[in-house]
Image: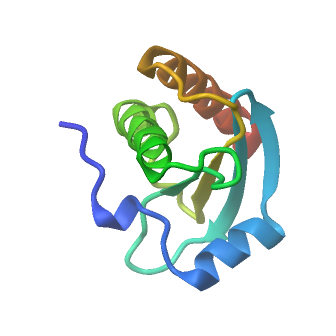
Amino acid sequence: MNKFPKSERLRGKRAVEELFTAGKHFTVYPFKVIFYRKQQLQPPLPNQMMVAVPKRTFKRAVDRNRIKRLCREAFRLHKNLIPNKYDKYYLLIGYIYIGKEVPQYELVEQKLKQSLLRLKEMVHN
């Protein structure tokens, strides 16, 4: 069963700031993906993820929330593409939606899956 518990959600001002200041990024349109390898703590933490949708592009909160919901669902289903627990670190992952229109779920799922595979390659190198 694939769940998306609170422990896998990236939250907290300090953690988000750390992701945006020290993280590396790449683009898989319509997403800009930012990731940061963080030192593992005791007890081990799972990979954490967040989604951001700019208010400038999507004025209506309904649209922003729909995009975030689609992204979280796709991540929940495909998060097993990247290992959940590494020995020495865990990942902070941020998805920024840079598209101009509200996407269909199939597009979000395909691109998010593609981004997770690319993320796996980049982290292991």
* Residue sitting at x 59%, y 82%: 13
Q: Which corner quadrant holds the N terminus? A: top left
Q: Left or right: 41 with respect to 100?
A: left
Q: Which quarter of the figure has residue 102?
A: top right
Counting from the top left corner in percent of width and height, residue 107 is at: 53, 17
Q: Which residue shows up at 59% across the image and 33% down it?
A: 116
- Extreme residue in the bottom direction: 14
- Name the residue furthest left: 1
In this rendering, the answer to whether 83 lies above or below 15 is above
Q: How is the image coloured?
A: rainbow
Report the side of 18 relative to 76 (left or right). Answer: right
Q: Which quarter of the picture shows residue 66?
A: top left
Q: Nearer the viewer, residue 16 or 63?
A: 63
Q: Residue 7 appears in which quarter of the rendering?
A: bottom left
Taking the spot 24% from the left edge, 46% from the top edge, the residue there is: 3
Residue at x 82% of width, y 54% of height = 24
Question: Residue 79's spot in the image, x, y percent?
Answer: 43, 38
